[in-house]
Amino acid sequence: MQCSLGTIGDSLPDWVNLSYANVATTSPIAHQTSTEWSDSLARGGAAEFDGEAEKNGMMPLRRATARLLSCKVEDVCVGSSATELLCSVAWATSPPKGSNIVSTRASFPSTVYPWIRVADANGAEVRLANHNSDFYTEPDDILSLIDEDTSVVTVSHVEFSSGQRYDLRRFADAAHSVGAILVVDATQSMGMVPIDAPNSGADVIVSSGYKWLRGTYGAAVGYISPSVRPDMYPGLVGFRSHDDIWDLRAERMTLPEDASRFEYTTIHFGAALGLAKAVDELCDFGTQEVWEHDIKLADKVIEGANRLGLSIISPRSEGERSAIVSLRMPDGISSEVIARRLQDEHSILVTSRAGLLRVSPHIDNTMEEVEMLFQALESIFS
Ligand SMILES: Cc1ncc(COP(=O)(O)O)c(C=O)c1O
């Protein structure tokens, strides 16, 4: 389907990027905004980006993200990467000795490592639910790890290798029933899956900007629910942590009431300004429309895989699927070699992850491009 979003694709270069779970081909408007900001800084430094601009530098992205997540601007903060925000949240939560943190073994390491670090420091325990040989984790296996000592449940909304999507409300209810919080890494869902943050039940939602949100490297966003915010003393602090950032006195630090308490220093403001444009663009397209478009592309991937007799490891049920579709290669054929040949010989980008070929199309892609992938695979296999 060449949907109404197709005009974006028209200005894209020669690559066919079917790998948004890896790195987006940056939204043209995000690229332009970020580049213009870099040019202005190179030209005039603080004459072109002064103290007031720096103070307000996160606001466009905070506003755009609030629109995307149906929450208030006060609930949103900006950082440089998802990992950085997750680290700060982990230290802010600081699960005490004797408590436990529940997550999954299928998680991207950055979803879990910050908690391992804090757990090591505090004497807390990290409990990870197992997955089967298709990287599928039974949601009940995660829930069964939660007990009275659980202080945090943390999951990737969509798992990076299988594309398995979790029901956040279910985990939020289970976490809250024992007084724990739900921290969600939405790096593999935000921009693809519609998220209503306040109604999801999640206490924290973090996403990187350079995948499904279609920004560049160097900017990420966080939702910090008002119910947990007052108790959160960010793990990372700096001059920007004080509520009046230009009242530079080292002897005191008063954190802002809102989520911007997690913003602590300078960042690549161009990346954040560009990402704001990309997020606004997603909102203008309509989050439901984007989701439906992506799922149609995923259906086309499934159809192509079936035609070639490739087994699909990603969940297919409506409640658990996403636009990440991972395929097992025929016996004796390496997914790494196939991904490399698709790139070198056909200019098609997919990712090799955990021995699987991960296909992750998004709004810039068309049905024809997915078809090109399977024609290329057919020719490689023959
Ligand atoms: C689920 C998930 N979280 C976090 C990251 C890394 O994000 P960042 O580079 O912004 O730290 C990735 C990257 O693939 C990811 O898949």
Image: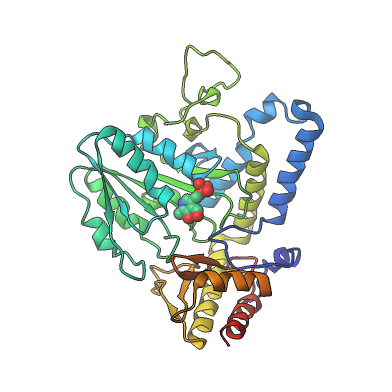
**What is the quadrant of the N terminus in the image?**
bottom right
Q: Compared with residue 41, is residue 22 higher up or lower down, i.e. above or below?
A: below
Whole-percent x, y for residue 375 in the image: 62, 83
User: Who's the residue at 60% across and 55% down the image?
Assistant: 283
Residue furthest out toward the right: 43
Left or right: where 149 falls relative to 377 = left
Residue furthest out toward the front: 332
Is residue 239 at least partly visible in the picture?
yes
Left or right: where 8 falls relative to 146 = right
Residue furthest out toward the left: 148
User: Who's the residue at 65% across and 37% down the image?
Assistant: 269
Q: Quadrant of residue 17?
A: bottom right
Whole-percent x, y for residue 329 in the image: 47, 78
Whole-percent x, y for residue 134 in the image: 36, 71
Left or right: where 41 falls relative to 93 = right
Q: Compared with residue 23, is residue 270 higher up or lower down, i.e. above or below?
A: above
- 262 or 304: nearer the viewer: 304
Is residue 70 at least partly visible in the picture?
no
Colour mapping used in the image: rainbow
Whole-percent x, y for residue 286 in the image: 58, 60
**What is the quadrant of the C terminus in the image?**
bottom right
Question: How many circles with numbers are drawn on the protein?
Answer: 0
User: Who's the residue at 48% across and 85% down the image?
Assistant: 306
Q: Compared with residue 349, is residue 201 higher up or lower down, i.e. above or below?
A: above
- 29 or 156: nearer the viewer: 156
